[in-house]
Amino acid sequence: LEGQVIIRSDSLIEVGAEAQLKDVLLVAPYIIIRKGFRGSVQLVASRQISIGDNCRFDYPSSAVLLQRELAGQGEIKVGKNCLFSGTILSLPREDDTGKTRVSLDAGTEVEGVVYVSGYLSLAHSVKGIVLTDYFVYQTPSTIYENYLVNASIDRKALSGFFAVSPFFSLGSVRKLVQWVD
């Protein structure tokens, strides 16, 4: 599937490695992307986004968690050795005292913006901007809050051509994200 396609489910969307998606919007409470997927998609979930190992998300992809229910902690999990070029955004309900959780496993690199209203576990690198309430580092025996281990964040490595969502309103300059036919 390519361009201006919206796939919506009231329960689950599961995408296999063999799927060929370009500029497709997926909307569901739960979204699962299987190991080895490659494409350009916008993922919007209300409960959980799970991305397998060795995936590649081409610009302008996004993984957005907009939690709508108070049932448990919302979560975005990105597996090992993935490349994500775009925006990862995680927000709880306004009236929820809990926070969302985002985990970026070892070898995963994000080129873009990571915004987490909650807990971010970062095990590799972000070339761009990170905004989070808490960094979390977990070992088999304990959890450390506001620790980064074997991780890097390099704001200056983000391309000058990278355009962010108007959600961030980083100024009055508007940039073209992508031409749509």
Image (spheres, grey):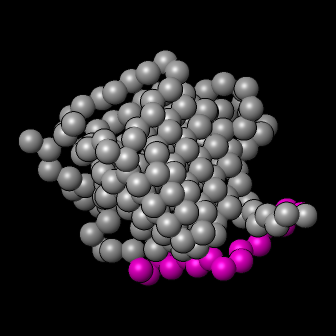
Q: Relative to 151, is 165 on the left or the right? A: left
Can residue 86 be seen by looking at this rendering? no
Q: Nearer the viewer, residue 108 or 101?
A: 108
**Looking at the image, is 86 positioned above or below residue 49?**
below
Q: Residue at x 66, y 24 (%)?
A: 69
Residue 152 in the image: state x and y as whole percent. 58, 79
**Looking at the image, is 149 positioned above or below residue 38?**
below
Q: Residue at x 25, y 55 (%)?
A: 177
Is 23 magenta? The answer is no
Is 151 magenta? The answer is yes
Magenta part of the protein: which range? Answer: 142-157
Q: Residue at x 77, y 72 (%)?
A: 147
Q: Relative to 125, is 178 on the left or the right? A: left
Residue 43 in the image: state x and y as whole percent. 43, 40
Q: Residue at x 50, y 39 (%)?
A: 32
Which quarter of the rendered picture does the N terminus lie within?
top left
Residue 51 in the image: state x and y as whole percent. 51, 49
**Looking at the image, is 72 positioned above or below residue 138?**
above
Q: Relative to 53, is 37 on the left or the right? A: left
- In the orientation shown, which residue stands out farthest toward the left? 181
